[in-house]
DNA sequence: TTCTTTTCTGACAATTGCTGTAAGTGTTAT
DNA sequence: ATAACACTTACAGCAATTGTCAGAAAAGAA
């Protein structure tokens, strides 16, 4: 069952949207408070986010900007603000579609369905900025370049991406991949970090992983 | 450089579109005849297809229907037909976006850019009906299921998908993968076909590959 | 500047997965 | 019934992966 998160402050419209999509067999989550909601949205791991722009205490533009760097689900803007500039701004911020209210339910459904279908393959992809990792194949994509990682390399990079932009401790990585360091030498992590860094270099991602001495590793934020 | 194919019968509009996108640095191909044009379109391997609906001798709907089963590029409909039913029909046939004329150039560009960005990862994906194969990782996707194939399995399936729904001869597959049968036993193909079929079965694709006795193999059309 | 701690690197060997060969079985057409 | 074609399983060799080892390099503390 696919999950849709709806961020809409108008109570009647929100309820109508919940009804529209629930009847179509979607699981719908529609928070009624919107401050600092982006963490919740990411945790819900929706297949689609339907987002209004005018929200109390924040704006859909701000939410979009904060969500996009790590999300792999599409964002559909549904708003009463009908100017071309607003539409262009939303698309620039990473929204996939921009619809004006009022919108006939069948049109909204058709566009929503199409977005979820297009993003079907992104369900197993995680990302950090411009770097994406497919969790089934450990294929790493960055700009026009791709690199298939080995299993161990892929699992390490996954830990870093899922924590982006925070630091992951060596202890946590050792626990996740080898169940701790009781049965393997701790150097196994450093050796595989070297191999992973070499693979990243092959597609132009030199120095993408930062060592935090005495703690672990992280993918810094920035122009990547 | 990204390539855009434009299918538009109105000469002035076609030229305006060519100018709009060429100035943005895209390679633009805009045929001026439209009968049996879908084969050309597929051969161009565009990053985006911009398609009118009203065309002499055919319709954008028909083109869309014929192109979609094997394409991995997005289709953006640009039309004067402004009814909700036409939009729904186009989306149903697999179009990714539907814009009405007249459309401000900056809006068209923004939507086109967003589609090409979304489809960035599809540049290395080929498909046959509902079956998709990533050419970098040989990850096979079918409905909600995925399977990473070995190198040999992937290369064989690629031959079949690229020829879909036609038959590929055993000779052609042998030539493509092993340079013919001078240096390997011909049974190598049957053995690997068995392995490939086993991998397809793992994700619900029993009997997807059809043997054409004395000739080769093919992926039939149908409800797959 | 020196010393200690931490991290990195290259080489090697063991393990695992891949893949062609061989032999036998099954299917289809004559 | 027979021949031709296709499929399947097991085996062995090869290639890729991955942990260990030893030494080098880098960073921080004294």
Image (cartoon, coloured by chain):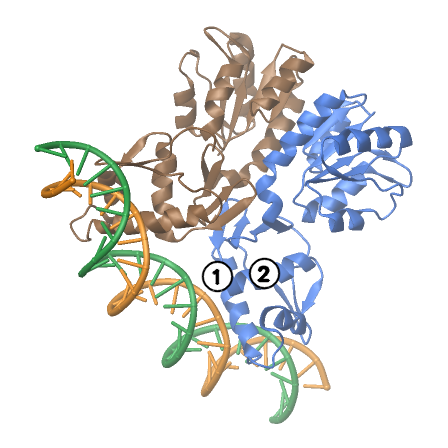
Chain colours: A brown, B blue, C orange, D green
Q: Nearer the viewer, residue A84 or A165?
A: A165
What residue is at 89 percent from the left and 43 percent from the top?
Answer: B33
Kindly state the secondary structure of the residue where label 1 is placed: loop
Per the image, label 2 sits on a secondary structure element best described as helix
Is A70 positioned to the left or the right of B2 in the image?
left
Q: Name which residue lies at 67% across and 18% down.
A: A104
Mark before the other along the chain sequence, 2 or 1: 1
Work out whether disc 2 and disc 1 sit on a shared chain.
yes
Q: Which residue is drawn at the image coordinates 69% and 55% (left, top)?
A: B221
Q: Which label sits on residue B9?
A: none
Circles 2 and 1 in contact, beta carbons < 8 Å: no
Q: How many marks?
A: 2
Q: On the image, numbered disc 1 is attached to which residue? A: B150
Decide: few, some or many residues near mark 1? Use Cα within 10 Å; few <14, some 14-19, many ≥20: some
Q: Quadrant of residue D6?
A: bottom right
Quarter of the image for residue B112 reads: top right
Residue D2 lies, in percent from the top left, at 62, 93
Pinpoint residue B12: horizontal percent, then vertical percent.
Answer: 89, 29
The residue that appears at 43% across and 42% down in the rendered structure is A206
Above or below — where is B39 with respect to B154?
Answer: above
Residue farthest along the top direction in this orientation: A56
Using the image, tell me which numbered label, if any, was put on residue B157: 2
Left or right position of A208 against A24: left
| B55 and A159: which is toward the camera | A159
């Amino acid at each position: 069952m696919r999950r849709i998160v709806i961020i809409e402050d108008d109570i009647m419209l929100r309820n109508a949207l919940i009804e529209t999509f629930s009847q179509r067999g979607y699981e719908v989550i529609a928070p009624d408070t919107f401050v600092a909601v982006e963490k919740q949205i990411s945790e819900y791991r929706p297949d689609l986010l339907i987002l209004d722009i005018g929200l109390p205490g924040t704006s859909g533009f701000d939410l979009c900007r904060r969500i996009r760097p790590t999300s792999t689900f599409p964002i559909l803007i549904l708003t009463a603000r009908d100017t071309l500039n607003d539409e262009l701004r939303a698309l620039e911020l990473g929204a996939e579609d921009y619809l004006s209210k009022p919108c006939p339910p069948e049109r909204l459904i058709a566009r929503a369905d199409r977005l979820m279908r297009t993003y079907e393959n992104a369900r197993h992809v995680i990302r950090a900025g411009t770097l994406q990792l497919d969790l089934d194949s450990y294929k790493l994509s960055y700009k026009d370049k791709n690199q298939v990682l080995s299993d161990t390399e892929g699992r390490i990079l996954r830990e870093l991406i899922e924590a982006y932009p925070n630091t992951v401790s060596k202890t946590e990585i050792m626990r996740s991949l080898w169940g701790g360091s009781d049965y393997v030498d701790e150097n196994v992590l450093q050796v595989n970090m070297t191999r992973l860094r070499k693979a990243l270099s092959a597609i132009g991602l030199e120095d993408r992983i930062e060592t935090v001495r005495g703690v672990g590793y992280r993918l810094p934020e920035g122009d990547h």
